[in-house]
Image (tube, rainbow, N blue to C red):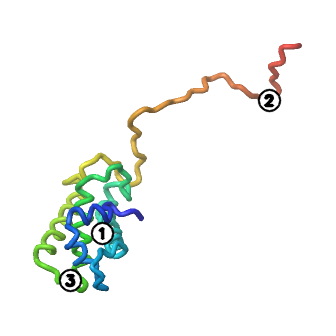
Amino acid sequence: MQPYATAAQAIARLSLSEAVMLTDRECTGDVDRDRLTAALVSASVEIDSYIGTRYSIPVMLDPVPLTLVEACIDMAVYKLSRGAVVLTEEVKSIYDRHVRWLKDVAAGKASIGAPSPVAGETPVETGDVVLFNAGSQRIFARGVSDDSDG
Protein backbone atom coordinates (compact mmCIF):
# COMPACT_ATOMS: atom_id res chain seq x y z
CA MET A 1 0.00 0.00 0.00
CA GLN A 2 1.16 3.51 -0.80
CA PRO A 3 0.90 5.71 2.28
CA TYR A 4 -0.90 9.05 2.07
CA ALA A 5 2.38 10.82 2.87
CA THR A 6 5.90 10.05 1.69
CA ALA A 7 8.99 9.84 3.84
CA ALA A 8 10.26 13.01 2.13
CA GLN A 9 7.05 14.87 3.04
CA ALA A 10 7.33 13.66 6.64
CA ILE A 11 10.95 14.76 6.93
CA ALA A 12 10.11 18.17 5.45
CA ARG A 13 7.19 18.65 7.86
CA LEU A 14 9.02 17.38 10.96
CA SER A 15 12.63 18.45 10.34
CA LEU A 16 15.55 16.16 9.71
CA SER A 17 16.60 16.06 13.36
CA GLU A 18 13.13 15.08 14.59
CA ALA A 19 12.83 12.40 11.89
CA VAL A 20 16.20 10.98 13.00
CA MET A 21 15.13 11.07 16.66
CA LEU A 22 11.91 9.18 15.87
CA THR A 23 13.37 6.51 13.59
CA ASP A 24 17.07 5.95 14.31
CA ARG A 25 17.01 3.02 16.74
CA GLU A 26 20.52 1.86 15.71
CA CYS A 27 22.12 5.29 16.43
CA THR A 28 23.48 5.78 12.91
CA GLY A 29 22.59 9.46 12.84
CA ASP A 30 20.38 8.96 9.77
CA VAL A 31 16.65 8.70 9.20
CA ASP A 32 15.57 5.06 9.04
CA ARG A 33 13.39 5.49 5.95
CA ASP A 34 12.06 1.92 6.19
CA ARG A 35 10.86 2.51 9.75
CA LEU A 36 9.39 5.90 8.78
CA THR A 37 7.62 4.46 5.73
CA ALA A 38 6.24 1.57 7.81
CA ALA A 39 4.77 4.07 10.29
CA LEU A 40 3.27 6.09 7.42
CA VAL A 41 1.70 2.92 5.98
CA SER A 42 0.34 1.99 9.41
CA ALA A 43 -1.14 5.49 9.80
CA SER A 44 -2.67 5.27 6.30
CA VAL A 45 -4.28 1.93 7.14
CA GLU A 46 -5.73 3.45 10.31
CA ILE A 47 -7.02 6.44 8.33
CA ASP A 48 -8.71 4.07 5.87
CA SER A 49 -10.33 2.21 8.76
CA TYR A 50 -12.18 5.40 9.67
CA ILE A 51 -13.01 6.88 6.27
CA GLY A 52 -13.67 3.60 4.47
CA THR A 53 -17.38 3.79 5.22
CA ARG A 54 -17.62 7.18 3.52
CA TYR A 55 -14.92 7.17 0.82
CA SER A 56 -13.56 4.58 -1.59
CA ILE A 57 -10.25 3.54 -0.13
CA PRO A 58 -7.46 3.94 -0.59
CA VAL A 59 -8.18 7.49 -1.70
CA MET A 60 -6.58 7.65 -5.14
CA LEU A 61 -6.19 11.37 -5.76
CA ASP A 62 -3.15 13.09 -7.18
CA PRO A 63 -2.16 15.09 -5.31
CA VAL A 64 -3.31 13.53 -2.06
CA PRO A 65 -5.41 16.09 -0.12
CA LEU A 66 -3.25 17.98 2.36
CA THR A 67 -5.63 17.00 5.16
CA LEU A 68 -4.73 13.33 4.64
CA VAL A 69 -1.01 14.05 4.26
CA GLU A 70 -0.92 15.95 7.56
CA ALA A 71 -3.03 13.39 9.40
CA CYS A 72 -0.84 10.58 8.08
CA ILE A 73 2.40 12.24 9.21
CA ASP A 74 1.09 13.22 12.65
CA MET A 75 -0.38 9.78 13.25
CA ALA A 76 2.91 8.19 12.15
CA VAL A 77 4.75 10.38 14.68
CA TYR A 78 2.41 9.06 17.37
CA LYS A 79 3.09 5.48 16.31
CA LEU A 80 6.86 6.06 16.27
CA SER A 81 6.71 7.75 19.68
CA ARG A 82 5.29 4.68 21.37
CA GLY A 83 8.64 2.90 21.09
CA ALA A 84 11.94 4.09 22.49
CA VAL A 85 11.00 7.77 22.14
CA VAL A 86 8.95 9.28 24.95
CA LEU A 87 5.37 9.99 24.00
CA THR A 88 4.52 13.59 24.87
CA GLU A 89 1.10 15.01 25.68
CA GLU A 90 1.37 17.22 22.59
CA VAL A 91 1.91 14.23 20.27
CA LYS A 92 -0.98 12.37 21.93
CA SER A 93 -3.24 15.44 21.68
CA ILE A 94 -2.48 15.90 17.98
CA TYR A 95 -3.15 12.21 17.34
CA ASP A 96 -6.46 12.39 19.24
CA ARG A 97 -7.47 15.49 17.25
CA HIS A 98 -6.89 13.62 13.97
CA VAL A 99 -8.91 10.63 15.20
CA ARG A 100 -11.82 12.93 16.11
CA TRP A 101 -11.59 14.55 12.66
CA LEU A 102 -11.55 11.13 10.96
CA LYS A 103 -14.64 10.11 12.93
CA ASP A 104 -16.32 13.32 11.75
CA VAL A 105 -15.34 12.48 8.16
CA ALA A 106 -16.83 9.01 8.56
CA ALA A 107 -20.04 10.54 9.96
CA GLY A 108 -20.29 13.01 7.08
CA LYS A 109 -19.64 16.02 9.33
CA ALA A 110 -16.26 16.79 7.73
CA SER A 111 -14.52 16.23 4.42
CA ILE A 112 -11.04 15.16 3.39
CA GLY A 113 -10.95 18.29 1.25
CA ALA A 114 -11.67 16.65 -2.08
CA PRO A 115 -14.73 15.08 -3.67
CA SER A 116 -14.80 11.32 -3.45
CA PRO A 117 -17.56 8.80 -3.92
CA VAL A 118 -19.05 6.92 -1.05
CA ALA A 119 -17.46 3.49 -0.68
CA GLY A 120 -19.02 1.03 -3.08
CA GLU A 121 -20.24 3.64 -5.56
CA THR A 122 -18.71 4.17 -8.98
CA PRO A 123 -16.72 7.39 -9.18
CA VAL A 124 -18.09 10.03 -11.50
CA GLU A 125 -15.71 10.71 -14.38
CA THR A 126 -14.73 14.32 -14.84
CA GLY A 127 -12.72 16.01 -17.52
CA ASP A 128 -12.63 15.11 -21.19
CA VAL A 129 -14.83 12.13 -21.94
CA VAL A 130 -15.35 10.56 -25.36
CA LEU A 131 -18.46 8.48 -25.98
CA PHE A 132 -18.77 6.14 -28.93
CA ASN A 133 -22.14 5.16 -30.34
CA ALA A 134 -22.26 2.41 -32.94
CA GLY A 135 -25.75 3.43 -33.99
CA SER A 136 -28.67 1.12 -34.41
CA GLN A 137 -27.66 -0.61 -37.63
CA ARG A 138 -26.25 -4.07 -37.15
CA ILE A 139 -23.00 -4.75 -38.90
CA PHE A 140 -23.04 -8.53 -38.68
CA ALA A 141 -26.06 -10.84 -38.73
CA ARG A 142 -26.72 -14.47 -39.64
CA GLY A 143 -27.83 -15.08 -43.17
CA VAL A 144 -27.37 -11.48 -44.25
CA SER A 145 -24.85 -10.69 -46.91
CA ASP A 146 -23.65 -7.37 -48.15
CA ASP A 147 -22.50 -8.89 -51.40
CA SER A 148 -22.90 -6.16 -54.00
CA ASP A 149 -21.75 -8.41 -56.86
CA GLY A 150 -24.98 -10.21 -56.92
Residue lying at the far left in this picture: please name it.
Answer: 89
Q: Would residue 126 appear left or right of 72 to someone viewing this image?
A: right
Q: Secondary structure at mark 2?
A: loop
Indicate the amino acid at tag 3. Val
> Picture coordinates of residue 70 (x, y %)?
22, 60
- Residue at image point 39% right, 35% down: 127
Q: Nearer the viewer, mark 3 or mark 2?
A: 3
> Picture coordinates of residue 65 (x, y %)?
27, 52
Q: Considering depth in this image, is 92 or 12 the residue closer to the camera? A: 12
Query: What's the distance in space between the residues labelled 3 and 2, CA to CA?
Result: 76 Å
Instruction: Evaluate if marks 3 and 2 touch, with contact meaning CB atoms under 8 Å apart.
Output: no
Q: Secondary structure at mark 3?
A: loop
**The N terminus lies in which quarter of the figure?**
bottom left
Indicate the amino acid at tag 2. Arg
- Residue at image point 15% right, 69% down: 94
- Residue at image point 34% right, 51% down: 118
Please name the residue that numbered disc 2 is placed on.
142
